[in-house]
Image (cartoon, rainbow, N blue to C red):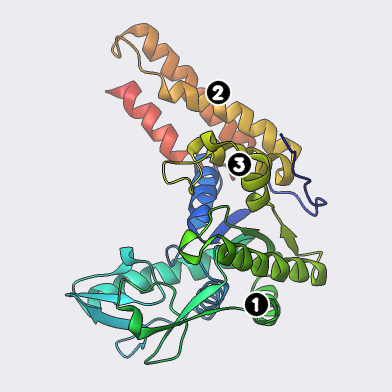
Amino acid sequence: MTRVEMPQKGFEINHSKAVMTMGSCFSEHIGRNLSDNGFRCDTNPFGVLYNPLSISAALRRILSGKKYDEEAPELIAYEGNWHSLMHHSSFSASTKAGCLSLVNERLLSASSFLRGAGVLLVTFGSAYVYRYKPTGEVAGNCHKLPERMFLRERLLPETIVEEYTSLLAELQSYNPDLHLIFTVSPIRHLRDGLHGNQLSKATLLLAIDHLVEMHPAKCHYFPSYEIMLDELRDYRFYADDMLHPTPLAISCIWEYFVEHFFSLSARKTLQVWEEIRRGLEHRPFNPDSEQYKQFLSQLALRIEQLKEKNPNFEVEKELTLCRTRLNR
């Protein structure tokens, strides 16, 4: 393998730091792994977003905490449902009120979460944006509206840098302890063509590199795109569409993430937690046997001890599951 050179380590993550992830579906993968490993994590409060301007707009809305109302230009009716051009289709509803309720509930929880977060992971997917012609604003999600309703353009690195320079100032004012990790999604966008995809990713990489150079104390880079394309080049790391990473590839990138950013104590905690998780996944031949009851009792005790040593470790769901099996 061609090993990917990791950037210089700037700070460490442990379970005392809550993490928000924003951006492409790769943010969903990282967010899920963080939650599964005991971190307090808020993943994509607007749903999946691909381009830097939509991610920035979502973050600014979270910072303001301003609710969407009936007159919000982002809300549109199409094919029997109400959608938000700033949100994933999971926020769509059959009524405007229903859509607003989903959007605003998530917005308020994200606004509160971000104020206490220690890390914001931002994943850029594409430098191409779609402007909604009636308003001229960049859409986070087009909801399969006709293409004629949008103008497509590729952002310049300078545009992204300018947008995020002012956004970073707002983020630091809102939460001075916040660190940002930028990464580029390892998923290629073949709709842009292979050359177009490379131009798009290059635009994102150049913009991130400039931002990290300007703000080395608070901005950091994680090379997920390089790991996928340069190190995990074998097609066993790709799904059937030959574009998306397999669970094995995600696991490899996650291991890099853990090794690079997590503190030594956090990594040791994860080793203990992995043993506990394997115990929870165990399926006995006889769940009512005394031997299995003792096994569950020991498992519950280990979870409680882990929580006692690491008060910020999120284990309530697993502890409840263990006790439920023990008491049935």
Q: SS class of the residue under badge 3?
A: helix
Q: Which x, y percent locates residue 202?
A: 67, 65
Q: Which mark is residue 200?
A: none
Nearer to us of marks 3 and 2 is 3
Label 3 and label 2: CA atoms lie apart by 18 Å
The residue that disc 2 covers is 275
**Of the image marks 3 and 1, the number of the one nearer the N terminus:** 1
Q: Which mark is residue 160?
A: 1
- Number of residues whose C-alpha sits closer than 10 Å to that of mark 3, classed few (under 14), some (14–19) or many (20 or more): some
Q: Which quadrant holds residue 262?
A: top right
Q: Is residue 15 visible?
A: no
The residue that disc 3 covers is 254
Work out whether 273 lies above or below 223.
Answer: above
Q: Nearer the viewer, residue 113 or 221?
A: 221
Q: SS class of the residue under badge 2?
A: helix
Q: SS class of the residue under badge 1?
A: helix
Residue 194 is left or right of residue 221, and the answer is left
Q: Which x, y percent locates residue 158?
A: 70, 80
Nearer to us of marks 3 and 1 is 1
